[in-house]
Image (spheres, rainbow, N blue to C red):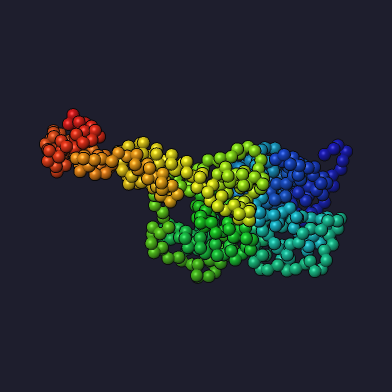
Amino acid sequence: MMPGQICVALPHDPFEAASSLATCVLGDPPYARRGGIVREPDLAYGTVTVALEHLANLASGFFGTAEELLMQRTLVNYCAFQMTPAMREAFRERVRTGVGAIRPSGRAPWMIATYPGNLVCPLCELAAWNEYGTRAMLWPHRAPLVRACWRDGAQLVPTLPGPAPCYPADRVREATAAQRQFALDTVMVCQLGANCEQAALEFEAQIAAAGVRRSSGTYATAQFSHSFREFCMAQVDDPALHRFFCRPRFGRDVLQWVRSAGVAFIPPFLLVLLLGWLRLAARSPATGLLPPPQYPHCGRTLARRVTGWAGRYSRARRPADGRRRYDQSDIERLLQAHCTVAQIAVLCRISESTVSRYVSTHGLKSLAAAARIEQARTDVRRAWTRACHRYPNRSRNAIRKLEPRAYQWLVTHDKAWLRQQCQAFEHRSGWRRGLLPTPGSAATIAAQVRRAHRTIVSGHRKARCTRAALCRALGVTPYLFDRWRSASPLIAAAIRKALE
Ligand SMILES: [Zn+2]
């Protein structure tokens, strides 16, 4: 404050936001530079624009200390739920003193509905004007997804500019009971946010009381997810959020936060919804005690071990220079260079559906299909030949087990090449053909010899590994044994090692 200036602190609505007080005392705040963009300073959904210590000092403690301002006039505690413990402290420090680096949270699409147009309650605005003579912005109205005033149940409306609030009578509409309850719960969650750890413990106890925790200590995650998802879908009508609610791990994440004792983070509006769900669960017996699942391992997936080329999950190379700029006119050229639709979307900075539409309207579908095949071809062929070189004595079926996806792809798209590859294996003829019928036979027999050697050596009788012992273990005559030895160097090496 400049010396000589007199700061007049007047009474204000007890729920007026700190940013609104700051505007009354200091005027509109100067623009701040954030992320390279000049914009209005705002933290905690626009409830903080000036460091709270500065504001408290200016009013000489009339509005309370910085800590009191933080607790009673901002949404800082509400925001605390979406941060890790370290971030929480940094954020509170920044709000109090105005220094310290924090990363401002981005705004999800559904937040745009409440931000940046300032939503106000027309009744509260009129009351503040009549009682205190100022226009007031109240912090409970600033929280995301709040559509009603928690105090008098009126629907929130976009604020009107001007020195005095004059809202037409038809703008004042009564909100639904659910909207009002949501607003009340939001205020409650903000109060709980003063101590996130304690809040998590309380939620845990309530969740257990609602029957989600069984007597064995496990959580009925699937049932809770289903019930809570239904509740959220009915409460919130935003399509963007419906996709969020439909995520497979939605209910599990909520329960994980509850069990983490406040160490994890969670979008605070989910806690607002959870409060509503708990109220419903306490009332209706339908969501009461939940039975244990019928199949205890239901929903658990076994990790499958698939080797070789990853198929559609492989990281595709980009055949075009990603540093250049492309637009829609380049799509055909990129297709000819064997770029896939997803890669073109990234290169041209447009959505995949736009590329697909362009491809179908310009008759480029066959080109796109060819590009998809051509892009994979090099990788698949390389994977197949690499496997062949690595295991030179294995049959095509053995290689197929190592490279299941590549084999499937080659059979579908590149059969002629695959047939040539098979010819690269030496077809045995003469007496060897009877002994070793497939290219993989030698490897199989060598493996059997090694196994027999291990069995003989590791037996408790400490037998010596001789040719006769090997023949007995393998169940073959010495004549066949010697034929094997001379038929393939691979078998010969295995036998030599076994007899050492
Ligand atoms: Zn109101």
The image quarter in which residue 232 lies: bottom right
Can residue 341 be seen here? The reply is yes
Can residue 60 be seen here? The reply is no
Find residue 99 and report its horizontal and vertical position in percent.
Answer: 70, 37
On screen, residue 109 above or below 281: above
399 relative to 69 in the view: left or right = left
User: Relative to the observer, which residue lies in front, 173 or 48?
Assistant: 173
The mark total stands at 0
146 relative to 230 in the view: left or right = right
User: Relative to the observer, which residue lies in front, 298 or 199?
Assistant: 298
325 relative to 165 in the view: left or right = left
The structure residue drawn at horizontal position 67% and vertical position 47%, both measured from the top left corner, is: 329
Find residue 42 and report its horizontal and vertical position in percent.
Answer: 73, 46
The structure residue drawn at horizontal position 88% and vertical position 38%, both measured from the top left corner, is: 4
The structure residue drawn at horizontal position 68% and vertical position 51%, both measured from the top left corner, is: 75
Residue furthest to the top:
500
Find residue 201 and report its horizontal and vertical position in percent.
Answer: 53, 53
User: Relative to the observer, which residue lies in front, 350 or 79?
Assistant: 350
Image quadrant containing the C terminus: top left
Find residue 260 and report its horizontal and vertical position in percent.
Answer: 51, 49
The structure residue drawn at horizontal position 25% and vertical position 42%, both measured from the top left corner, is: 441
User: Relative to the observer, which residue lies in front, 198 or 449?
Assistant: 449
